[in-house]
């Protein structure tokens, strides 16, 4: 058997894992879910879920990957016995499902970027809407999906060190610099404070009982950290024994949350100062592709520069995430069938392309449906099913597996990297008695919202 690949350094792993976490989910998802009206309640629930569920879960997922040294498909059965095999399949299925629509969003991002760079920004909302309607489905969307998938595949085909680690080493620091620069610039805009207040700081206690706000907070936390799908598990299987998992997890979660908040600090002032709050409050996945360029166009050359920087950084963030999603089936095929990396990448890429196709073409009128389904609806549906319900379900299974079925695996792994016993106990207690009930609520609410 070939020697197992490894990260060049602990820092390389942290950057790659943070790169997986930081993506369109932070730049788009955060802004669009925060703008659906939850205000401060959404923000607080999101932060709470990140700390009490995602953080311990991330440690557990990494421990599973590192201690077994196996792929997401095989690791659950190695740890918990054959009964846990379906969890491995779930990881692979959800990765395909998310990557299937993720590369389409990347395509939109890339096209908007190129358009801003080459032709400039749309002068008003109608023109922007027109442009978005052109790229969101059909041939242009297919082209964007195809090229983004090729780029992702090339990086993954180059391997752990030469592909994924190298990309994250320059991509993530660059992204932080750009984003901090833009947030500082946006803070000087006229509506900045109004923007923070309306979207992030407005308190309305009724929201605490609003199922949409609660399920949005769960989806946002799970999707943006990327826990519960095996991506971090795959990365951790290339990690050496010394890396201190709790510390790495705090770093990854911290960077991810910081990027979400910073992205909000860029988009909300923009939205407010251009008087686009109304357009955004009925937000869909596509809204920001229309409102941001329109708003920025009123600032002339500066606006164009900001748009180019913002969409470029979104694309960089997206590709460091898409490679981690593709790594799940690729590592699984290599592990289970002994395939070479290149072969596994080719087959996985073709499958991803096929899965995403209905989100490009839409669905014709099918028996049982009263109408044809638009490509945007399919995309939204895939986002809710794979990026919501099934992702959170994966998280639930992981908490049960490492909290109750195979806790000694977690303990042994944490012992091996010198985690203080008190911290080990705390993590296990959290996983068993806090994360598990909370994530169960998350699954129930997201299923109800989905139906
Ligand atoms: N976390 C990524 C984002 O925010 C998406 C992702 C989900 C990556 C699941 C890996 C696993 O865009």
Image: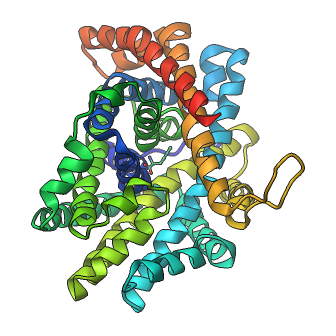
State the image coordinates of residue 11 (x, y, percent, origin top left): 29, 46
Q: Considering only vertical position in the picture, is 119 above or below 336?
A: below
State the image coordinates of residue 60 (x, y, percent, origin top left): 44, 23
In depth, the one of 369 and 264 nearer the eye is: 369
Q: Quadrant of the N terminus?
A: top right
Q: Quadrant of residue 446?
A: top right
Residue 143 visible, this orientation: yes
Tell me what residue is drawn at x 39 percent, y 83 percent: 116
Q: Considering only vertical position in the picture, is 117 above or below 217?
A: below
In depth, the one of 196 and 113 nearer the eye is: 196
Q: Quadrant of residue 306?
A: bottom left
Q: Residue furthest bottom?
A: 119
Tell me what residue is drawn at x 35 percent, y 31 percent: 207
Tell me what residue is drawn at x 34 percent, y 67 percent: 313
Tell me what residue is drawn at x 73 percent, y 59 percent: 358
Residue 242 visible, this orientation: no
State the image coordinates of residue 226 (x, y, percent, origin top left): 46, 40
Q: How is the image coloured?
A: rainbow
**Number of dots carrying numbers:** 0
């Amino acid at each position: 058997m070939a020697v197992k690949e490894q990260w060049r350094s602990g820092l390389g792993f942290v950057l790659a894992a943070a790169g997986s976490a930081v993506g369109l989910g932070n730049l788009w998802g955060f802004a669009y879910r925060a703008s659906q009206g939850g205000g401060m309640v959404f923000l607080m629930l999101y932060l709470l879920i990140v700390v009490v569920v995602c953080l311990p879960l991330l440690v557990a997922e990494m421990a599973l990957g590192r201690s077994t040294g196996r792929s997401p498909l095989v690791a659950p059965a190695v740890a918990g016995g054959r009964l846990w095999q379906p969890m491995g399949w779930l990881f692979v299925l959800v990765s395909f499902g998310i990557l299937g629509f993720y590369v389409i969003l990347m395509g939109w991002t890339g096209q908007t970027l190129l358009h801003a760079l080459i032709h400039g920004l749309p002068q008003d909302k109608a023109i922007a809407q027109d442009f978005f309607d052109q790229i969101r489905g059909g041939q242009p969307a297919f082209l964007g999906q195809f090229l983004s998938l090729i780029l992702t595949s090339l990086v993954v085909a180059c391997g752990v060190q030469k592909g994924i680690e190298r990309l994250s080493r320059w991509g993530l620091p660059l992204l932080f610099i750009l984003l901090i620069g833009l947030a500082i610039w946006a803070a000087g805009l006229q509506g900045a404070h109004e923007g923070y207040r309306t979207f992030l700081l407005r308190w309305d206690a009724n929201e605490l009982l609003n199922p949409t706000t609660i399920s949005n907070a769960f989806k946002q936390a799970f999707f943006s950290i990327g826990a519960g799908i095996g991506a971090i598990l795959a990365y951790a299987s290339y990690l050496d024994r010394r890396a201190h998992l709790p510390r790495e997890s705090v770093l990854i979660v911290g960077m991810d949350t910081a990027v979400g908040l910073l992205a909000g600090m860029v988009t909300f002032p923009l939205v407010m100062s251009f008087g686009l709050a109304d357009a955004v409050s009925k937000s869909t996945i596509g809204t920001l592709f229309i409102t941001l360029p329109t708003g920025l166009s009123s600032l002339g050359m500066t606006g164009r520069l900001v748009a180019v920087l913002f969409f470029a950084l979104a694309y960089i963030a997206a590709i460091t995430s898409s490679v981690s999603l593709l790594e799940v089936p690729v590592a699984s095929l290599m592990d289970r069938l002994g395939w070479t990396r290149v072969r596994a990448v080719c087959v996985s890429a073709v499958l991803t392309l096929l899965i995403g196709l209905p989100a490009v073409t839409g669905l014709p009128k099918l028996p049982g449906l009263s109408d044809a389904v638009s490509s945007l609806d399919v995309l939204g549906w895939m986002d809710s099913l794979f990026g919501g319900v099934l992702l959170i379900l994966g998280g639930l299974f992981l908490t049960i597996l490492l909290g109750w079925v195979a806790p000694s695996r977690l303990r042994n792994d944490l012992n091996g990297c010198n985690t203080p016993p008190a911290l080990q106990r705390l993590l296990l207690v959290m996983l068993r008695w806090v994360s598990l009930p909370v994530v169960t609520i998350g699954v129930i609410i997201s299923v109800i919202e989905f139906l």
